[in-house]
Structure formats: structure tokens, C-alpha cells
Image (cartoon, rainbow, N blue to C red):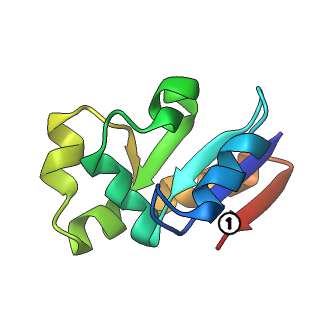
Amino acid sequence: MILHILTKAPDSSAATQMQQAVGDQDAVLLIEAAVTAALDVSWDAWQQYPSRIFLLSEDLISRGLANIAEDNELPTLEMEGFVALTEQYEKTVTWY
């Protein structure tokens, strides 16, 4: 079980590589520029693993995207949830 942390926008090569690497037991946390995925609810990852992908609230707020994520009922986590995810998964991979 791996927690994949994506820091780049959903149209980046890092995002594409991450999507190819995510396994059935893995989860994804979108941070930094990756939270712009809230602007594209048709992004493949939302359909591939919708119950295992999360957006970091603090990064959504700093980019003015919190309302968009809320309106689209996208799963968000605050920093405490981020820490809990890192404790829950055996490994963590960050995609830059």
C-alpha cells in the first residue's frame, strides 16, 4: 500500500507517470499545484480511483479553489488528515 503525493498539475508528466503507477490498494494526495485538478472533474484519476484521491485543503484555500472543490464534492483533507494518511500507508512516493 502506497500513498502517492502529487505536487504538479494534472496535465504534467509527473501526473501521467503517477497514474500509471497507482495500484489497487494505493491512495493519492494532491498538494501544491496538483490541487488544480479541482478545476477539471473529468481528469482521468477522478474516475480511476475516486474514493482514494484527496486534495489538501490548505493548498486549495491558498489558490482560491476551496469553493470549487466543495461544489464538486471532491474529497479534501486538512494537514491532520495528511499526517494520518502517511501513518496509514506503508510507503510514500512524492511525484515532482
Q: Position of residue 27 (x, y in %)?
A: 65, 40
Q: Report the residue at 60% width, 46% height from top.
A: 28
Q: Position of residue 46 (x, y in %)?
A: 46, 32
Question: Where, quadrant-wise, is the C terminus in this rendering?
Answer: bottom right
Question: Where, quadrant-wise, is the N terminus in this rendering?
Answer: top right
Task: Write down the quadrant of residue 60 in the picture.
Answer: bottom left
Residue 77, relative to residue 33: is it above or below?
A: above
Residue 55, relative to residue 72: is it above or below?
A: below
Q: Report the residue at 47% width, 55% height from top.
A: 10
Q: Report the residue at 47% width, 45% height from top.
A: 54
Label 1 crowd (10 A; few <14 / some 14-19 / many >=20):
some
Residue placed most toward the observer, 54 or 37? 37
Q: Position of residue 48 (x, y in %)?
A: 57, 26
Task: Write down the quadrant of residue 58 in the picture.
Answer: bottom left
Residue placed most toward the observer, 77 or 65? 65
Query: In the image, 13: left or right of 61?
Result: right
Q: Position of residue 41 (x, y in %)?
A: 31, 36
Q: Which residue is mark 1?
A: 95
Residue 43, relative to residue 48: is it above or below?
A: below
Instruction: Count all numbered tags in the image, as a single digit.
Output: 1
Q: Report the residue at 22% width, 66% height from top.
A: 61
Element at badge 1?
A: strand
Q: Amino acid at mark 1?
A: Trp
Query: In the image, 70: left or right of 43?
Result: left
